[in-house]
């Protein structure tokens, strides 16, 4: 599967919002929307996503014929692609996934993934796979400790990649995992995700829309 083309914007309110507008206007993708700056970035449960210049803000817009439940598996594809991006520049062994799709560096959150969907005029389901990565800066006062790639670089890497460079690496990695998911199904994605995920079979807390579940 060839990587989807990239639309690079200097600024937008939110790359996910831009993807939604394009889907509502009939656009089918696949298309990556990347912004150098967001004025109204969003995280899970409507939280504000700080959008400092120098970080990566991106969304993949594409259609799928999968059911909504099956299409939700794309969040695992996204987590693996982000892990590949960070591992290309971070110190060995520093990158891991935290259930379900937080990608961590040295135990601190370095990215956010937000998948949204809706009915397309074609009858298919549109997906907006939003991915934000802390390349140069990490926000303060977050629910969980956050970090940026710039603080965890390999000795042979002098600087964190620019958003443009990081987007290219992410898009290539995403295309590889997406192809495996489309051709081989979910099991190889789950196996790869499990191999990179720490804390499985340990206590965890899931904060849902209106409830918190522990297990």
Image (cartoon, helix red, strand yellow):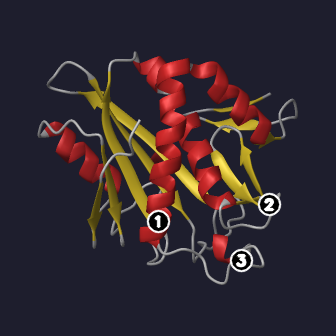
Please name the residue that numbered disc 2 is placed on: 94
Residue lying farthest to the bottom in this orientation: 158
Tell me: 178 left or right of 30: right
Please name the residue that numbered disc 1 is placed on: 56
- Residue 4 position in % (x across, y down): 34, 46
For marks 2 and 1 on the same chain, the one whose residue lies earlier in the sequence: 1
Seen at 38% across and 50% down, the residue is 59
Marks 2 and 1, how far apart at CA: 19 Å
Q: Is residue 22 visible?
A: yes
Question: For this rendering, which residue is in front, 48 or 63?
Answer: 63
- Residue 197 position in % (x across, y down): 77, 40
Q: Does 54 appear above or below 6? A: below
Residue lying farthest to the front in this orientation: 2
Seen at 65% across and 25% down, the residue is 188
Tell me: 201 left or right of 152: right
Which numbered circle lies on residue 151?
Answer: 3
């Amino acid at each position: 599967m060839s990587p989807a083309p990239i639309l690079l914007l200097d600024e937008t309110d939110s790359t996910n919002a831009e993807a939604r507008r394009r889907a509502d206007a009939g656009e089918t993708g696949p298309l990556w929307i990347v912004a150098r700056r967001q004025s109204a970035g969003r995280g899970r449960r409507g939280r504000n996503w700080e959008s400092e210049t120098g970080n990566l803000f991106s969304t993949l817009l594409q259609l799928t014929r999968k059911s909504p439940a099956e299409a939700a598996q794309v969040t695992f594809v996204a987590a693996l692609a982000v892990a590949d991006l960070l591992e290309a520049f971070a110190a060995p062994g520093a990158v891991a996934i935290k259930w379900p799709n937080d990608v961590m560096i040295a135990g601190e959150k370095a990215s956010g993934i937000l998948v949204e969907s809706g009915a397309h005029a074609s009858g298919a389901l549109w997906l907006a796979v939003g991915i934000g990565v802390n390349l140069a800066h990490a926000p303060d006062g977050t629910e969980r400790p956050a970090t940026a790639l710039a603080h965890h670089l390999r000795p042979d890497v002098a600087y964190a990649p620019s958003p443009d460079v990081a987007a290219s690496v992410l898009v290539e990695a995403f295309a590889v995992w997406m192809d495996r998911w489309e051709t081989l199904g979910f099991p190889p994605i789950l196996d790869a995700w499990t191999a990179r995920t720490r804390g499985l079979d340990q206590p965890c807390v899931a904060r849902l829309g209106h409830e918190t579940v522990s297990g």
